[in-house]
Image: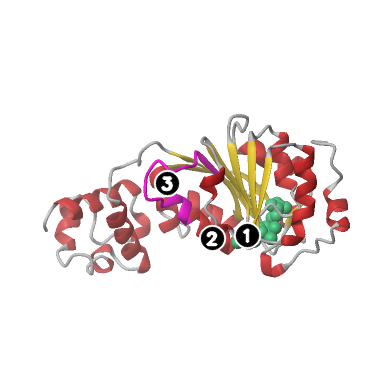
Amino acid sequence: MIDNLPPLRDVIARHDLRAKKALGQNFLLDLNLTARIARAAGDLSSADVLEVGPGPGGLTRGLLAQGARKVLAIEKDARCLPALEEIGAAYPGRLQVIHGDALAIDPLAHLTPPIRVVANLPYNVGTELLVRWLTPAQWPPYWDSLTLMFQREVAERIVAQPGGKAYGRLALLAQWRCEARIVLTLPPEAFSPPPKVSSAVVHLTALPAPRFPADPAILSRVIAAAFNQRRKMLRASLRGLDPQIEARLTRLGIAPTARAEEIALEAFCALARDIEHQRP
Ligand code: SAM
């Protein structure tokens, strides 16, 4: 028992929160599990937490029970609001709920650093928000860490290392300026209703500065070009960026015949810097 509130099954029945597929609703009902996810987010006692998609509030309860200074929860489905209000009443002054689309709301006006982000979101919204969180105008970003549930396959793409099919733009984007690791994997039965695939929680910590220097726009262009045609050799996939790419790659010690998925982050950064500073 993490709090004195009723079990989530009762909450869902009382507020008639039948899961809606269109909103990607797969709820976590086991409060031991939501407490574990909240613990994976790190020390919450001195942090404000942004939670996206609280639904009936299982994870919200975990975050509050773990001592979060404040939770700002953004939920699109109005049916969930009364259930969330009950949680707010049990933790006076610590839960603020905003009804709306997380993609359209700027949470910063309501939060005080340090800020940690925690969410169990539908797949499409989750990936879009992750990319936004990873590409702010300034680094370091406003958040210290992201603790996010994804389909397992997406989680594996975030933490992937060179040499496999999972390695690509998401891994490079995440690992350039974050420490990223999978902290929990969950079978479909952990959710109600169960989704078709397994899920995993990824914890990302923002590094104070990028692992290797590079201009974000140039690095992003290089990586996009390399992985848009990931089966081609770099000398072909990157020719559009620079007609002399073969000589440039050779000078940098990168095999022009290698494919994108064999190339480490450090080499992509070196290439971005070279394109920025050296004429071919
Ligand atoms: N966090 C709850 C849990 O773990 O049981 C619910 C998870 S459920 C996978 C995703 C939640 O995100 C749903 O409550 C859904 O209504 C909400 N949601 C979907 N799209 C959203 C959006 N664009 N902005 C805010 N919430 C959204």
- What residue sits 31% from the left and 46% below the top? 266
Q: Is residue 66 magenta?
A: no
Q: Which type of secondary structure does the marked residue at label 3 adopt?
A: helix
Q: State which mark lies toward you, 2 or 3.
A: 2
Kind of residue indicated by mark 1: Gly
Q: Which residue is mark 2?
A: 104
Query: Residue 53 falls in which quadrant of the image?
Result: bottom right
* Disc 1 target residue: 100
Ligand number 1: quarter of image? bottom right
Q: Secondary structure at mark 2?
A: helix
Q: Which mark is residue 232?
A: none
What amino acid is at disc 3? Gln
Q: Position of residue 100 (x, y in %)?
A: 63, 59
The quarter of the picture where the C terminus appears is: bottom left
Which of 34 and 12 lies nearest the eye of the viewer?
12
Q: Is residue 260 visible?
A: yes
